[in-house]
Amino acid sequence: MYALEKQTNDLTLSDEQVMLIESARSFCEQKSPVSTVRELMQSDTGFDPEVWQEMADLGWPGIAIPEEFGGSGLGIGSVVGVVECMGRRLLTAPLISSTLAAQLILRSGVGSAAPQLLNIAEGMVATPALYESADTGAGILCELSPSGSAYRLSGEKLFVNDVAAAQLFVVSAQLDGELRLVLIDAEKLSADAIRPHRLIDETRRAARVDFSGAEISAAEILPITKQALHEVELLGALLIAAESTGAAASCLDAIVDYLKTRQQFGRYIGSYQALKHPAVDILEGIEAARSLVFHAATIVGTGGLSVDAEIACRMAKAKANDVLLYAGDRAVQFHGGFGFTWDCDAQLYNRRGQWALQQFGDSRYHRKQLARLLL
Amino acid sequence: MADNIKEIAAYRAEAAAWLRENIPPRPDFHVPLTFMEVGSEEKLDYLRDWQRKLHAAGFLGASWPKEYGGAGLTHAHQMAVDAELRAQNAPIIFNVIGTGWAGPMLLHLGSDADKSRYLKRILTAEDIWCQGFSEPDHGSDLGNVQTRALRDGDDYIINGSKIWTTLGNYADYMILLARTSSEGKNKYAGLSFFLAPMKIEGVSTTPIRKLTGDYGFTQTFFENARIPVSCRVGEEGEGWKVAMKILEFERSVSGGQATSHMISSTSMADLLKSLSQQHRDGEPLLDDPVVRDDIVELLIREKALSLNDKRAAIPVLSSDYPGSLQLGFKRSSTEFIREMRRLAGSLQGLQGGLYQGDPDAVDDGFWQYAYMNAFNATIGGGTSQIQANIIGEHVLGLPKS
């Protein structure tokens, strides 16, 4: 059994991180009113390229990329606060995708991929392509085979995020029974390679991508360990947890706003304890999730993840999943008839919660892994 | 800053060494886990001796001024000692209404005379304190207090009754909220606050037996009890303000307590240790996937609560809902403890039905007893439901219920 009392309890922010969060908070508030969120739901990429360019100018895609590769080297823990601010305004941009793609490259040892890291740090959209079925633990079948002096990839990946905007795919594959990362430029894909999923969260984009036939040079193939892949998934879980925590807070704001202004039977509905107490439960859940998220952010570091860091990422994801789902569920219910409509923002949070739940592990999955680590 | 951290670490090390030598051996009776369970003279004597010893060694009231019996250090010093008290599973400091509530209130609002008169004797447990807020018909509705304090020359004459008086039968003083007037713009305006002596004519107590089967608090009756005007804190009619200040200390919204070690906490580590011995259908209980999921849910909650203080100290991470972490802590932590203890008993199979005193009970029936006792904290000091109203109204700005 894991010695619970030996677990670290760190939760700190550097002055730089505080400044980053403060600037991200006002940026996201300014750029992403809910009317903009709804407009972007209609677009192909799901985000505004000009806003993404501004984020790149602020250095956000390079936060977790070391200085030698064009980033600011602040570490993945510093991305967490920014992503929470994005969630707080439902601001969609490919920051998580690009950050995780860069982490894959970094954790593969970089090799010949330094130029790609530099481009990511400057705002080139990159995205991981890791899964081949809804069972994300099912293993990797995509295969590299020699073709003349180069290689060809065969296989299709599912649930690849931000495909329409991605210029670089970081794809997991097998080469002679060994795990590899393959860097594939978007322009190498055939015209019919991409088949978009219809996601329940309409602020998001993901697709099936068929990489079959793409020709790959040796320089575009990097070694990667199972452990490194697994770590990037945990970091993905942490970033989604941060984003969901922000979204839950935004959802609570929407609920509170309605409870304070809607009257029935001559009273503001927020005066009824049947609505007030669940709102307080949502707040308590947000507080718990935020503590766990920033604890994880404090201890993830830049290298391999410690057991404590793995525990922290999983706890953060399990809690953030549950609080956003609960908030989104109650948001619809508490808005009554209006809550059942498309025009009510409750649906945005409800749908966001359903999709975020499944990204990098649902709550039961993480609790099961935590049981393995803790019991 | 770095010097301060070193100094506090040294202070904790000193306390740790002293505690290793001086924590009293466990007696053959059940040592109270909370200050609400002091139900017999032998328990009282045991805890009073322990408190005196800790104070004499300089590890109680570290942040209180020297002239009032403290050590003249900082709150952080006491927190360091408290962490060590918990780590070494030391008996609780029982005189909580003095050390935790009335004491800090006096440091904020009391006159110099009050401070000299009361504070040191709180720390030494020469004076035991109790609280007279709740009344038989007004539990959660504190503003509706009906106990009367009638001015008569240089005295007040008190009549009425208080209930749930923890330590009532042993107490020397009560922090008393009483009505000096029924006029005024609202029910709060007529209330005044007193430091009322208990061992005087006209004050009597009747012990109340709790759902656990033991004693620890009383109903307290005032029949023409006469107390001098100097016992009043604040002006006549300003009692509500003082009472609210007390509640800030009681709910740990404000610091300044002589110690925070007033409850022997149980943690998930204790629970897991206990459950590791249990079997179901011949298999270790902790291999059962359903049980594991229940436990991990609570582990996540425990972890989040343990991070509260650290996050509350970082403004950019806690200014979103001002006061939320502070006001929410009482509800979230007491509800967590109740649920953890309930789960413990529910996982013991048939042994889960055995109580203290049965030789076959798991951990001497501790979990069953502790579960029922946990309602102390989810009800006392404002029920969880009242807390939810407070949080909803004060943090989220929702309209009053």
Image (tube, coloured by chain):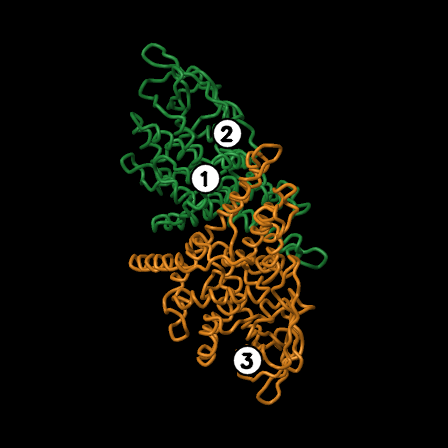
- Residue nearer the viewer, A208 or B260: B260
A144 is higher (above) or lower (below) than A317? above
Q: Residue at x 29, y 36 (%)?
A: A70
Tag 2 subunit: A
User: Residue at horizontal 29%, vertical 25%?
Assistant: A112
> Under tag 1, what secondary structure?
loop
Which residue is tagged 1?
A2
Other-residue count near label 3 (Cα within 10 Å), few / some / many at <14 / 14–19 / ≥20 = many
In the figure, what tint was chain A given?
green
Quadrant location of the N terminus of chain B? Answer: bottom left
Q: From the viewer's perspective, is the residue at label 2 or at label 3 nearer?
A: 3
Residue bearing mark 3: B232
Q: Quadrant of residue B170?
A: bottom right
Quickly name the residue at label 2.
A206
Q: Amino acid at mark 1?
A: Tyr
Is B103 located above or below residue B19 in the figure?
A: below
Q: Position of residue A295 (x, y in %)?
A: 43, 46
Q: Amino acid at mark 2?
A: Ala
Regarding mark 2 in the picture, which secondary structure is present there?
strand
Q: Look at the numbered discs 3 and 1 and tell me whether their residues touch, using CB distance below 8 Å.
A: no
Q: Rate crowding at label 2 as few (under 14), some (14 to 19) or many (20 or more) other CA atoms within 10 Å.
A: some
